[in-house]
Image (cartoon, helix red, strand yellow):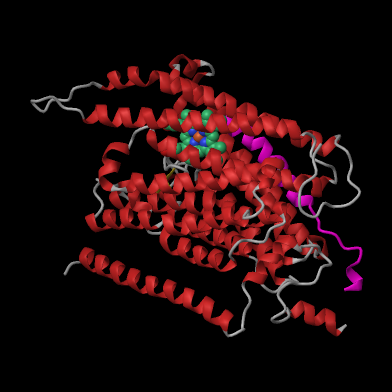
Amino acid sequence: MDIRELQGYASFFMTIFLVVMLYWYIVYLYRSEKKGDKDYEKLGNIALDDEIDSKPIDTSSVTPREKKEQDK
Amino acid sequence: MQSNAALEYDYSVAKLFTYTTILFGFLGMLIGTLIAAQLAFPELNYLLGEYGTFSRLRPLHTNIVIFGFTLSGVFATFYYSAQRVLKVSMAESKFIMFIGKFHFWLYFVGALLGVISLLLGYTQSKEYAQFEWPIDIVIVLVWVLWGVAMFALIGIRREKALYISIWYYIACFLGIAMLYLFNNMSVPTYFASGGLGNILHSVSMYSGTNDALVQWWYGHNAVAFGFTVPIVAMIYYFLPKESGQAIYSYKLSLLSFWGLMFVYLWAGSHHLLWSTVPDWMQTMGSVFSVVLILPSWGSAINMLLTMKGEWNQLTENPLIKFMVLASTFYMLSTLEGPIQAIKSVNAIAHFTDWIPGHVHDGVLGWVVFMIMAALFHMAPRMFKREIYSKKLLEAQFWLQTTAVVLYFTSMWIAGITQGMMWRAVDEYGNLMYSFIDTVTVLHPYYAIRALSGVMYLTGFLMFAYNMYKTMTSSRELTEEPQFRSPMA
Ligand code: HEM
C-alpha cells in the first residue's frame, strides 16, 4: 500500500469518526436539556437582552469576574 | 451592579471600521464595475496605462472587497456586537481599548500598502493571496491583534455563555489564521539568493499539484471563513435583535456550527476537479460539497424560521427585508455551489462565467446585504440618531436586488453557453467553435453584467449617503431603541 492509498483510507475513517461524533452531539444536546442540566433555548435571549446593566441570561454558573463583583 | 450605572458600551473602534467598510466597499465595487465594463468593451483597458488594465485591476477588485470591505465589516460588527452579547464594555479596560485602536490603525496602513503594492504590480500570483511577504507579515500582526482583543473581551465578560455569534467570530479568527499562514508560506528570493532581484519578490514553498491543493484548500475556505462564518455571526445577532425575536432553535444553531466546521474544510478540492490531484480527493471534494448543503441550510432555515409569526415585519421594516433576502441568497448560493461541484456539471461549468456568477449571487446578495443591514442597525445606536431616510433605503433595496438578479442570470446564461460551445464537436470530432466565436456570442451578457454593476454601485452610494446623513444630520434620539431601528 503506498502513501496515497493510505491517505485515502485515513480520510475515509476519519470521516466516519467525525460523522459519529456529530450525531452523538445531537443526542448530547437533547439529553442534557432533558436532564435539566442545560437550557439552550434560553441562550437565544442573549441577543435580545443585551444592555450592559441587564442581568446575564446564563445563570447556570458565574464567571470569575462576576464572583469578584459579588464578593465586593 | 450599582457601580456600573454610568457604564456604556464603547463604539469608537466599531465606528472607525464602519468608515473603512464604506470606503473600501465603494472603491472595490467601483473597480468591479470598471472591470465588468472592460470585459464587455475592451477599449476601456487603455484609460490609465498599465494601471488600468484588467489584469492589474482584477486582483485589486478581489482583494479590496475581501480584505478591505468584508473584513472591515466583520471587525466593525464584531467590536459592536461582541461587547453587547458578552455584556462588557471596551471602555472597562484600557488595554482592550488600546489594542482595538492599534488593530484599526495597523489594519488601515496595511490595507493601503496592499492596495498600492497590487497597483504597482507586486503579486505572489495566488488567487486571494496575492500580497507579497512584507504585507503578509502586517496582515498576520493585524490578525493577532484582533485575536488579543477578542479573547481579552471574552476573558472579562459578564455573560458566561458565549452567544452563538461569538462562536462564529472565533471560528473566523482561527480558520483564517490557519489558512492564511499555510498558504502564504514562501521564500523571499532576495534573501535566499544572497541579494539578487527585487526584495519584494518571493516564491511559494510548495510546487506543482501540492501548491494547487494548498491554494484551493485556502481559496475555498477563505470563502468559508471570510464570506460565510462571520456573516452568519452577524445574522445570528442582528436579525433577532432587529426583529425582537429570539433565534428559532438555538440547538440547531449549535449543530449547524459544528456541521459547517467539519464539512467545509474538506470541500476545497472541488476547485481542482478533472486536474492532476488524486482521484479520491476529487471525489471527496464533490461529496463534501454536496453534504455542505445541510449545515448551510440549517443556519439559513433557522434564520427564516426566526421570523415565524412576524412576517408582517418584512413589509414594514426594510432592514428585515435586507436580512431575509440575504439569508435567501445564502440558500441559493449554497445550493448552486454543490451543483457546480458535481463532476459532470463541473466539466461544463469550470473556467466559465458561471463561476463569477455564483460568486456574486453569494457576495452581492448575501455578504454585502448583510453587512449593510448590520451597519444600518448599528448606526442609530452608535451615533444616537435615527436612520436618515426609509424611502432611500427602500429604493436602494429594489435597485440592488434587481442588480444582483441581472448579474447572476446573465452569467448563468453566458457560462453555460460558453461551456457548451467549448465542448461542441462535429461528427468527425473536430471542435465546432473557435474561442472568438464564444466571445462574440457572450458580448450582450457581459454588457448586462456591466449595467448590473452600475446599478449595484449606485445602490451602494445610496447606502453611503444614507449612512453619512445618519451620522451627521438626522434627528437625534433621546434613548437607545430596543429592537426596531428608528428611521425617518
Ligand atoms: C458592483 C459590484 C461588483 C461588480 C460589478 C463585480 C464584478 C466582477 C468582475 C467583472 C469580476 C471578474 C470576473 C472574471 O474574471 O470573469 C469579479 C470577480 C470577483 N469578485 Fe466581483 N464585482 C462586484 C462586487 C463584488 C463584491 C462585493 C465581492 C465580495 C465581497 C466580489 C468578489 C469577487 C470575487 C471573489 C471575484 C473572483 C471570482 C473568481 O475568481 O471566480 N465582487 N467581480
Q: Is residue B13 magenta?
A: yes
Residue B9 occupies quadrant: bottom right
Residue B157 horizontal side relative to residue B43, left or right: right
Looking at the picture, tell me which residue is in the foreground, B466 or B391. Answer: B391
Looking at the picture, tell me which residue is in the foreground, B357 or B94. Answer: B357
Looking at the picture, tell me which residue is in the foreground, B147 or B164. Answer: B164
**Residue at the image position 80 percent from the left and 35 percent from the top:** B388
Q: Main secondary structure of the magenta part?
A: helix
* Quadrant where the image shows the C terminus of chain B: top right
Q: Residue B75 in the image: x percent, y percent?
A: 66, 51
Q: Give the vertical position of B387 relative to B7 (above or below).
A: above
Residue B151 occupies quadrant: bottom right
**Residue at the image position 45 percent from the left and 53 percent from the top:** B221
Q: Residue B7 in the image: x percent, y percent?
A: 87, 63
Give the residue at the far top of this rendering.
B43
Residue B270 horizontal side relative to residue B151, left or right: left
Residue B44 horizontal side relative to residue B268, left or right: right
Q: Residue B120 in the image: x percent, y percent?
A: 53, 31
Magenta span of residues: B1-29
Residue B182 appears in view: yes
Residue B21 horizontal side relative to residue B168, left or right: right
